[in-house]
Image: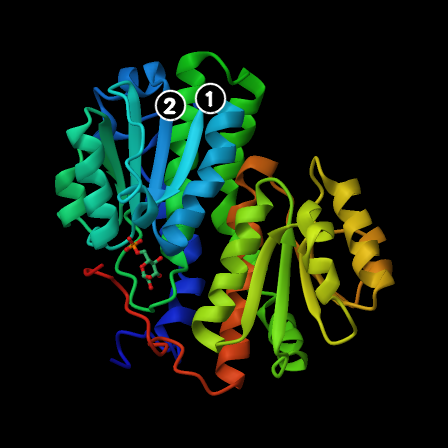
């Protein structure tokens, strides 16, 4: 086992540090000739269906559902298509309205999650086209779908999903970009910017990982916090959910992810000097709005850790701690902003003496209801 961990104390840390490679592996061979086209071999013959889809429904559980939420922003923005994101476990029991023109995209690392598999069968019976985004080759979900794209992220052993999440978002981004290109909804310059952005990501993640000592120090300060709130807007709202889930899963600290704009409708009542609040506050379209959300939390004495774009001077003056990440196009920025959150939960869980790779009550793959 020590050999399999490749010198890391836990699989989770190895997998977090493996992300520059796993993301590159998810893109390998899929971006062609001077960034002129994207090819996802497993989806050949299905792009017409996708382009004509009246609606795309993403289904998944846990972290895979969060990847679906990120995809909602990507597909709406880049391909101007109607999107819904569903927990597989709710979808399957709800008698959902499904049309033959719908395309269901099932997202699953293991490809064995029972609820996701059952939701696929239900959608299939109703005539929808089912595509899969799976990591495990030949898995039940991969076999149950009409077509799909594998992640090629390599095996993920740690129960808390890290590299599978970033590979899911990478593959879904490639799909959304390819679809936007085909539908003519994605301007040429944005297309190029996104492809260049994706190709720079492995190097940029290396840069975030080089900052791990600082993240560890911040983790040390907050080791014994009893609660955490994670806030983000737009495409960073699902990142807030994912950051909170990572912390809950492995450190057993209660954490909530929320859209920052919703804070005023409830979570703001929780804020006092004992409440750490993590903001994803990178320089993008909602920057000014998130700055005012930060001010609202500071006015109530909350302790703020902000994930910011490198070089940001303003937020540094407002908050207790900042963690810098490089700039990338907003639509793919979750791939960078999630990494410090993975590391923060990892270090807090280790400092609390938790069993990071095999947290209590959780399973890597949930093959029963
Ligand atoms: C379990 C795992 C999570 C995972 C979820 C969905 O709860 O502990 O890490 O996100 O199942 O799994 P899947 O294999 O379908 O992505």
- How far is the residue under mark 2 from the one under mark 1? 11 Å
Total labels: the figure holds 2
Q: Residue at x 28, y 36 (%)?
A: 95
* 192, 113: nearer the viewer: 113
Q: Position of residue 146 (x, y in %)?
A: 17, 31
Q: Are marks 2 and 1 in contact (CB under 8 Å)?
A: no
Q: State which quarter of the image contains the N terminus.
A: bottom left
* Image quadrant assignment for residue 340: bottom right
Q: Find residue 43 and report its image quarter.
A: top left
Between 100 and 332, the residue placed more toward the observer is 100
Would residue 32 appear left or right of 239 to someone viewing this image? left
As drawn, 187 above or below 97: above
Image coords of residue 188 (percent x, y):
53, 16
Q: Secondary structure at mark 1?
A: helix
Q: Is mark 1 within 8 Å of ligand 1?
A: no
| Farthest-out residue, top | 184
Question: Which percent across, then down, holds residue 88?
Answer: 31, 46
Residue at image location 66% in from the left, 74% down from the top: 218
Of the two numbered discs 2 and 1 in the rendering, the one whose residue sits closer to the viewer: 2
Q: Which residue is mark 1?
A: 79
Q: Earlier in the sequence, mark 2 or mark 1?
A: 2
Which secondary structure, mark 2? strand
Q: Residue at x 37, y 45 (%)?
A: 168
Tell me: 287 left or right of 95. right
Mark 2, residue position: 55
Mark 1 is surrounded, within 10 Å at the Cα level, by few (under 14), some (14 to 19) or many (20 or more) other residues, namely many
Instruction: Quadrant for the C terminus, please.
Output: bottom left
Q: Which mark is residue 247?
A: none
Q: Quadrant of ligand 1?
A: bottom left
């Amino acid at each position: 086992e020590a050999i399999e961990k490749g010198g890391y104390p836990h699989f989770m840390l190895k997998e977090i540090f493996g992300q520059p490679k796993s993301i590159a592996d998810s893109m390998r061979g899929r971006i062609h000739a001077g960034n002129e086209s994207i090819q996802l071999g497993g989806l050949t013959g299905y792009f017409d269906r996708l382009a004509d889809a009246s609606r795309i429904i993403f289904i998944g559980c846990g972290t895979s559902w969060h990847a679906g939420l990120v995809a909602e922003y990507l597909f709406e923005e880049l391909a101007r298509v109607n999107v819904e994101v569903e927990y597989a476990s709710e979808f399957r029991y709800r008698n959902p309205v499904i049309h033959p023109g719908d395309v269901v995209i099932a997202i699953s690392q293991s490809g064995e999650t029972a609820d996701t598999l059952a939701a696929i069968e239900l959608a299939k019976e109703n005539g929808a086209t089912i595509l899969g985004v799976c990591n495990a080759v030949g898995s039940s979900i991969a076999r149950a779908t009409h077509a799909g794209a594998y992640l090629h992220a390599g095996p993920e052993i740690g129960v808390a999903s890290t590299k599978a999440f970033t590979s899911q978002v990478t593959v879904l981004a490639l799909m959304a970009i390819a679809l936007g290109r085909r539908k003519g909804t994605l301007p040429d310059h944005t297309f190029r910017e996104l492809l260049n952005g994706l190709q720079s990501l492995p190097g940029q993640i290396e840069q975030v990982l080089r900052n791990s000592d600082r993240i560890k120090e911040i983790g040390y300060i907050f080791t014994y916090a009893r609660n955490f709130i994670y806030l983000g807007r737009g495409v960073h709202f699902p990142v807030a959910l994912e950051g909170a889930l990572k912390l809950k899963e492995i450190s057993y600290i209660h954490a909530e992810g929320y859209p920052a704009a919703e804070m005023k409708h409830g979570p703001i009542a929780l804020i006092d000097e004992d409440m750490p609040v993590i903001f994803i506050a990178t320089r993008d379209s909602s920057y000014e709005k998130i700055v005012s959300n930060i001010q609202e939390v500071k006015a109530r004495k909350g302790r703020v850790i902000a994930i910011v774009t490198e070089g940001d001077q303003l937020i540094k003056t407002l908050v207790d701690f900042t963690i810098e990440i490089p700039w990338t196009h907003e639509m793919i920025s979750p791939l960078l902003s999630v990494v410090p959150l993975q590391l923060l939960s990892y270090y807090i869980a280790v400092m609390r003496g938790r069993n990071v790779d095999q947290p209590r009550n959780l399973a890597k793959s949930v093959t029963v209801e």
